[in-house]
């Protein structure tokens, strides 16, 4: 088998492995987003429930914190869905700066990565 550096793209089997990983991360991210949205709903419906006896500023800070986390989850979901599109188009795992394959270890850690470690370090 050719070395990773000689390959121009991941094989269909490798892409399937990454797709499974992304599907798992996507399910967890959506579950987490639902959790945050429920927390925001609870705060809106009953602002005293979580912060009983504290002033409105603390409730507002908590609401802002949860909104920020929900926003991060939405971005992660979008990145993961974009990665699935790259898999479908068979361009997944190719660094957008260097055109070389991104290391499997990096993709397993950050499956929506579009930059190799080298390209990321140059930023």
Image (cartoon, rainbow, N blue to C red):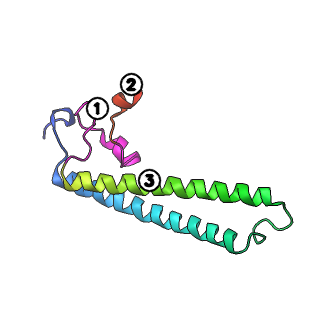
Identified at 18% across, 52% down, the residue is 89
Q: In this view, does 121 lie above or below 52?
A: above
Distance between mark 1 and mark 2 Cα atoms: 10 Å
Residue topped by disc 1: 97
Q: In this view, does 90 lie above or below 118?
A: below
Q: Give the farthest residue toward the top.
A: 122
Main secondary-structure element of the magenta-colored stretch: loop
Say which label, 1 or 3, has the lower sequence index: 3
Hey, which quadrant is residue 2 in on the image? Answer: top left
Say which label, 2 or 3, has the lower sequence index: 3
Q: Is residue 112 magenta?
A: yes
Q: Residue 122 carries which label?
A: 2
Q: Where is residue 65 in the image (x, y as percent from the top left)?
A: 65, 54
Q: Where is residue 122 in the image (x, y as percent from the top left)?
A: 39, 24
Q: Are marks 1 and 2 in contact (CB under 8 Å)?
A: yes
Say which label, 1 or 2, has the lower sequence index: 1
Q: Give the farthest residue toward the left.
A: 1
Residue topped by disc 3: 76
Q: Give the magenta range.
A: 91-113
């Amino acid at each position: 088998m050719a070395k990773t550096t000689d390959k121009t793209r991941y094989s269909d089997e490798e892409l399937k492995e990454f797709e499974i990983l992304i599907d798992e991360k996507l399910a967890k991210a959506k579950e987490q987003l639902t959790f945050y949205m429920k927390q925001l709903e609870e705060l809106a419906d009953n602002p005293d429930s979580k912060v009983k006896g504290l002033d409105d500023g603390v409730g507002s800070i908590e609401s802002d914190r949860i909104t920020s986390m929900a926003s991060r989850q939405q971005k992660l979901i979008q990145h993961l869905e974009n990665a699935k599109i790259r898999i479908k188009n068979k361009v997944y795992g190719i660094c957008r700066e260097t055109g070389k394959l991104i290391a499997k270890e990096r993709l397993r850690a950050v499956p929506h990565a579009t930059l190799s470690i080298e390209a990321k370090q140059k930023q």
